[in-house]
Amino acid sequence: MKNRINGTQKVKVYVDRLFVGIGDSQQLFDLKEELTTNLSEKMSDYKNTGMTEEEAFKEAIRSLGDLSALVNEMREIGQNQAKQAVYTSMSSRVSAAGIVIGTLIILFGLLTCAMLYSMGLSMDISSSALIFVVIGAPLVIYSVLTRESKTKYAMNRVRALLYSIAIGVILFSILVTALSGFATGEVFIAMSVFMVFFLIGIGIWLSLLFTGTGRRKEGV
């Protein structure tokens, strides 16, 4: 574990030095995160072949080839406020749309559940409408995480997707448990269903939590 942490830190330092002096931007943050992940994975692969950490580090860097074009591109973007503004504006609009749609889906599920229950339907049938909450909540989570703010950069889309899936699975476990409990009246069946999906969701969430990187903007 110690070697892995040191290797990750070494990769991060290398990537930071590669783009030193370049203006910060969401595009640069995304690229640095992608390069760090890529290099860390390559290092791990090379170490599994018997290389030392230093050998694996050098080989991983060598495998990326010449990055001068990427550095120049990020430098241009960092100096071009208009490009940054357009990129941020487009991302914000997509994110806002996701938040609005997700919220409407959640409200639809809650209101439908209340309506069905008020019509005298059983709780297991009424609560089945809450599946829309399970669908809408992950969409809201994904849209919030991929939205750049004044203090934080947007999260990598793959990580944000995995976070939203984890939340969706956890919510699904709660819903299925409730439906099973209402339908069968057997606590054992409800809990067994809950454990399977809940542990999967928590496992995904914890693995992301302990491998995350800081998104706070410098100087903020």
Image: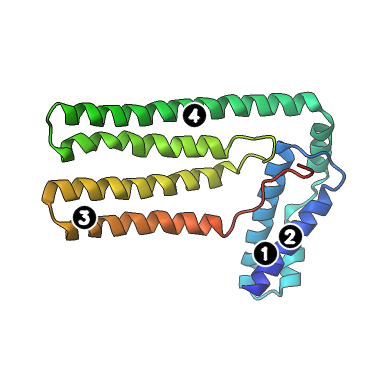
- Cα separation between marks 1 and 3: 44 Å
Q: Earlier in the sequence, mark 2 or mark 3?
A: 2
Q: Examine the rendering and report whether any part of residue 59 can be seen.
A: no
Quarter of the image that includes the N terminus: bottom right
Q: Which residue is under mark 2?
A: 11
Q: Is residue 79 left or right of residue 154?
A: right
Mark 3 is surrounded, within 10 Å at the Cα level, by few (under 14), some (14 to 19) or many (20 or more) other residues, namely many
Mark 1 is surrounded, within 10 Å at the Cα level, by few (under 14), some (14 to 19) or many (20 or more) other residues, namely many
Q: Amino acid at mark 1?
A: Met
Q: Secondary structure at mark 4?
A: helix
Q: Residue at x 20, y 45 (%)?
A: 179
Q: Is residue 91 left or right of residue 129?
A: right
Above or below residue 75? Residue 103 is: above
Q: Which residue is under mark 3?
A: 190
How far from the left and from the top, in percent, is residue 34?
66, 48
How far from the left and from the top, in percent, is residue 217?
73, 43
Q: Earlier in the sequence, mark 4 or mark 3?
A: 4
- Disc 1 to disc 3: CB gap under 8 Å: no
Q: Earlier in the sequence, mark 1 or mark 3?
A: 1
| The quadrant where residue 90 appears | top right
